[in-house]
Amino acid sequence: MNERVITAIDIGSSKIATIVGLDSKENDELRIVGFNSTPSKGVKKGLIVDIDKVTESIEESLERAERMAGQKITHAFVSVGGPHISSLNSRGVVAVANTQGEITQEDVNRVIEAARAISLSSTRQIIEVNPRDFIVDGQEGIKNPVGMSGVRLEVDTHIITASQINLKNIERCIEDLGVHNDGFLFAGLASAESVLTDTERELGVVCVDIGGGKTDVALYVDGALSYSTSIPVGARHITNDIAVGVPVSIDSAEKIKLFLSKHLRANKKGKLPEQLPMHELVIGETLDNFSVKNVIDGIVAPRLEELFKLVGDEIMKSTYFEQVPSGLVITGGGALTVGILETAKKIIGLPVRVGIPGKVTGLIDEILDPQYASTVGLILYGQSHGGTVKEGASVDFGSFFKGVSVGGSVDKLKSFFKQFIP
Ligand SMILES: Nc1ncnc2c1ncn2[C@@H]1O[C@H](COP(=O)(O)OP(=O)(O)O)[C@@H](O)[C@H]1O
Ligand SMILES: [Mg+2]
């Protein structure tokens, strides 16, 4: 059988999820054979604050996923998110090498490298160079210029940078565990890979992944990633607000929050009890009468409003606010918060839906949940970018540039293309 093992480690602000998949060349299917999710310790808003604790959490998650998959994990794609992520758009320009002939892959590599030449503080590192659009002799909107004739080649790219020290720390954690890093991917982009449709990306859409301590945002215009950022507010803030407002312990507040979202989804009529069923929730506190409406309208909704105002600010900042008619696709564990669709629609004024990850087969029931959007997206990204390509395989460069980006370094891009150059 012609199968390739792909592994991803999703380092979230509340959990570390490891996923192992087998990519079958025969049918392009990604079959999940191993999965684990472990609470992440030592990570705050996506930043590593305690290496030993993070290493322990990753080790636990890796071991369990290995046991389930029945194989040793030797390499993995790794997600990074949180407010240490920032992005910018950069244009590269080169003269086509052979002005008599056609634009070659070498020219494309050179122009992407030119776009990458940005002035960057020594504390930052590029993790993504995403070609959005090529321009040949002034003609815009070209997705793949190879084979065209022209003298001047330009590219518009979207570049994502991350805190170098944080990347080094993550790399150290996983290399200490004997795992080679196949590449870093921004968690917001990973989520977009698993929950957005091609049509949404073409029309323009914003993927909003609400994690525990941060919200990762990836905005697409004309099929290409055009803005990415991360907001330091997540679903854990809602729990904290409930704990303060009711008041109850953080554990009890989390139980109340999950009860409200699960109850509403299970009960299609949208009927909630008037009082919180404290006994049913096994909450230690002796508060037997607390109005559900107060929790939803007085505590949860104001925090969601604040979060979506921040998302709205970022969309304005991106300058693409008129180019995202598909609206918001909300994912991440926080996407299931009670009342989220109503609040998001009210604040943003665009269509809103919840994004549930898909596009994989195998052991999947547990992972088809918004909280694993970035986990599933990361392994899908690995499927299209990692490892070796079967001998004689032909590659559609159009689709390569469509929603896809170049993770890690230009060297990776080069080696990727070299495989197809005779
Ligand atoms: N069914 C649910 N309803 C409401 N909130 C949820 C639900 N499931 C998970 N969450 C919240 O999602 C957050 C974790 O989201 P997740 O995407 O797993 O974070 P990260 O990727 O940053 O680790 C937690 O605050 C948790 O309370
Ligand atoms: Mg996540």
Image (cartoon, rainbow, N blue to C red):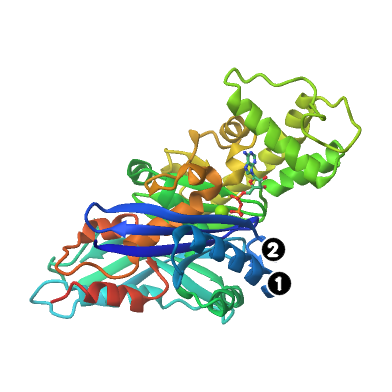
Identify the residue at horizontal 61%, vertical 22% (top origin): 267
- Asked if disc 1 is less than 8 Å from ligand 1, the answer is no
Q: Is residue 184 above or below residue 241?
A: below
Q: Which amino acid does label 2 sit on?
A: Lys
Residue nearest the observer in this picture, 49 or 266: 266
Query: Residue furthest toward the left?
Result: 100
Q: Position of residue 300 (x, y in %)?
A: 72, 36
Label ID, residue 50: 1
Which of the two residues, 81 or 262, is positioned nearer the viewer here? 262
**Residue 162 placement (x, y as % from top left):** 55, 70
Q: In this view, does 191 lie above or below 100?
A: above
Residue that mark 2 sits on: 41
Using the rendered view, name the quadrant where residue 158 is placed. bottom left
The location of residue 14, given as percent across then percent down, is 65, 55
**Residue under the point 64% across and 37% down:** 337
In primary-sequence order, the first of circles 1 and 2 is 2
Residue 9 position (above or below residue 317):
below
Q: Which of 105 and 172 is in front in this view?
A: 172
